[in-house]
Amino acid sequence: MAKIGKRSRPSAVVPKGFRDYFGHEVTQRQAVLNQISGVYDLYGFSALESSAIETVDALGKFLPDLDRPNEGVFAWEEDKKWLALRYDLTAPLARVYAQFQGQLPLPYRRYAMGPVWRNEKPGIGRYRQFYQCDADTIGSSSIGADVEICTMLCDSLEAVGIERNDYIVKINNRKILNGIMEVVGLLDGDNPDINSIKRGIVLRAIDKFDRLGIEGVKELLGDGRKDESGDFSKGAELSSEQIGIIIGFVKAKKDSTAQTLQALSELVKGSAIGLTGVEELLTLLELSELQGYASNRIQLDPSVVRGLGYYTGPVYEAELTFEVRDEFGIKRQFGSVAGGGRYDDLVKRFTGQEVPATGVSIGVDRLLVALHSKNVLSLNSVGPVIVTVMDRSRLFSYQAMASELRSAGIRAEVYLGNPKSFGNQLKYADKRNSPVAIIEGSDEAARGVIQLKDLVLGSKIAESVTHEEWRSQPAQREVLRGNLIEEVLKIISKK
């Protein structure tokens, strides 16, 4: 009889491009999501939670990372159908609207938040699973819907603690880019599928302008580019004349908005769709300014095109303008944390009829990093009050204290590990980032008092510290048992 081999133990390693989120990270993320959703709610948007899994057909092929398996999504076959984890929250919205349009108001205004998954090449700060927080309006072709998305994005950033001079919402219009494509001979209105691959490469090249600079974009528009890791990206193989026109579009930003619009008009002269895009931008900027969102908050920038292929009109990108140090210690501008635009053809894939739509997506994980770098959020949230166990026979008393604290809205827990080593209890409280530890031994119980230790003021607790040594430290004081809530609140309120 064959011997059954011993099963090897699995490696306790998270897959590449993924990460785990612990207590304070989850809590802080939820707090930020609540602040953003509060702004969305004020604007009249309603919540939607759609399925995390869609059919590949429903998601469509819009991701820019086309050289990845399944064109950038995590997909598998089931019952002769291909399913995939959603890569954003917009494509599922199009499916939801098409499925339930008879039951939904028109326009339909919804916000959604949750994880999305992309089968992209991971890198520093670039994960395959990340959180998004979206708001979209389906069923309105009014430029007012785009204005509202931009102003709401400004309000959301300020609500979470990004100061007004630390961000800018950059806008552009994909119709202008389509006009440029017509001018350079890459777009034919009668045969839109011709040169679609080249147009996709051009789009992704321009979208990487902030990261690669003009020379990097030129390489991608030409023969291709090899990055630092040695990976080669195929170029659009355009002529020098074509590249010159596209670079002129990317660099069309002038000293004033009027001059930039004039430059764009010159570049798309002869293209009806390009000139329409210029007019839409002018209207968007004028309406935004009338509401008090001037160029210090919403600003025209021709280099913004957005990487996804389904945008059809105005596009927007929120960029944080303050400096941070990268992993090499070099000062850099923080960069983009949100983006979106108009996508009038996405629902049409399901219904056969054009349904106008526009929306924005905030990258929550990047936003959290930004808030930490600005010290808006602390790296560690305040943990629960720890009720230590000095006498196991008095567990009922310790649980009663924890219950009183919770009833007063104060996070609290009784130490439930091995109580023999008091030092271990203090080390536990320190690891939990607890603001206060409570001690009640038999002596304190007999006198109707408790010991409160301010752990933030106290030095890091050593494992060998004894109860008597701890009591002698200045951050610890004795209070009446009946004043538990009042005294704990005094300590917490200072943090």
Image (cartoon, grey):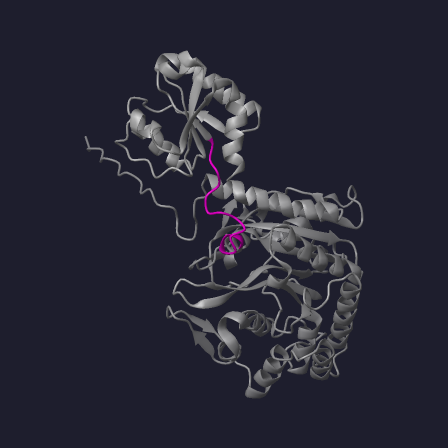
Q: Is 338 on the left-hand or right-hand side of 292?
A: left
Q: Nearer the viewer, residue 479 or 44?
A: 479
Image quadrant where residue 172 sits: bottom right
Q: Nearer the viewer, residue 476 or 107?
A: 476
Q: Is 270 on the left-hand or right-hand side of 22?
A: right
- Image height of 311 relative to 92, above or below: below
In reply to whether residue 376 is colored magenta, the answer given is yes
- Image height of 303 relative to 245, above or below: above
What residue is drawn where x is 77% and y is 43%? 104
Q: Is 136 on the left-hand or right-hand side of 238?
A: right
Q: Position of residue 117 (x, y in %)?
A: 52, 51
What residue is drawn where x is 48% and y is 38%? 382
Which image quadrant: the N terminus? top left
Q: How many marks?
A: 0
Q: Position of residue 110 (x, y in %)?
A: 71, 47
Q: Position of residue 18 (x, y in %)?
A: 43, 49
Q: Position of residue 367 (x, y in %)?
A: 55, 54
Q: Is 239 on the left-hand or right-hand side of 268?
A: left
Magenta residues span: 371-384
Image quadrant where residue 249 sits: bottom right
Classified by dominant secondary structure, the portion drawn in magenta counts as loop
